[in-house]
Amino acid sequence: MADKLGIFVSTEENWDHLLGIARAAVAKGKELIIFFTHRGTLLCKRPDFEELAKAVEGRGKMSLCLVSWNAHNLGEDHTVPGIPEKDFATQARHGELIEEMDRYLVL
């Protein structure tokens, strides 16, 4: 089984790093688990967010904090490439995901 790399994204300042790490991890056969919270949820509105979704597709999962999404007024439409409606969750989901990870990064 592939190692699982968790990435906790709480800021919108590291898009290039996030995308590069995700691509490198996938190239090395890692499974990705990415959780967006606080200002990191703003990344989900980037026009190029689909690049990350394509990198993760079939190689992991992404979810986000619905409370942060709402706090930043990102809208009622929960259409985000690579993040199904069921993965708009709470910090409790983040806590569950931590248990699954072999390595963990914070951006």
Image (tube, rainbow, N blue to C red):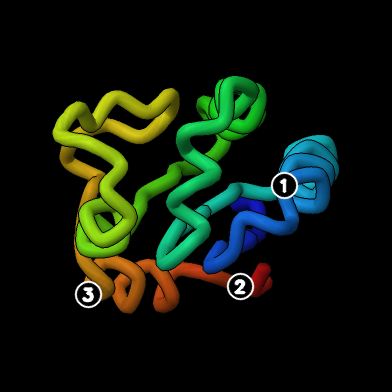
Q: Residue 56: x percent and y percent?
A: 58, 34
Give me the disc on residue 4.
Answer: none
Residue 46 or 103: which is nearer the viewer? 46
Q: Nearer the viewer, mark 3 or mark 1?
A: 1
Q: Residues within 10 Å of mark 3 (few under 14, many from 20)?
A: few
> Residue, x 74% and y 56% (percent of image)?
14
The amino acid pointed to by label 2 is Asp
Which is nearer the eye, 12 or 1?
12
Q: Which residue is mark 1?
A: 15
Return the x and y of residue 63 as percentages of the image width and height: 36, 49
Which of pointers 3 and 2 lies earlier in the amino acid sequence? 3
Q: Amino acid at mark 1?
A: Trp
User: Is 26 or 78 nearer to us in this picture?
Assistant: 78
Q: Could you say which quadrant of the image residue 91 lies in?
A: bottom left
Alpha-carbon span between mark 3 and mark 1: 24 Å
Q: Earlier in the sequence, mark 2 or mark 1?
A: 1
Question: Do the numbered discs 3 and 2 sit on residues whose CB atoms are within 8 Å?
Answer: no
Q: CA distance from mark 3 to mark 2?
A: 19 Å
Label 1 sits on a secondary structure element that is: helix
Image position of 17 with respect to 57: above or below: below
Q: Is residue 28 left or right of residue 9?
A: right
In the picture, measured across the screen, residue 68 lies left or right of residue 50, that is: left
The CA distance from mark 2 to mark 1 is: 22 Å
Element marked by disc 3: helix
The disc at residue 92 is: 3
Q: Amino acid at mark 3?
A: Ala
- Asked if the residue under mark 1 is in contact with the one under mark 2, i.e. CB atoms within 8 Å, the reply is no
Residue at image point 66% right, 59% down: 3
Q: Residue 81 sits in which quadrant?
A: top left
Which residue: 40% across, 77% down?
99
> Which residue matches tag 2?
102
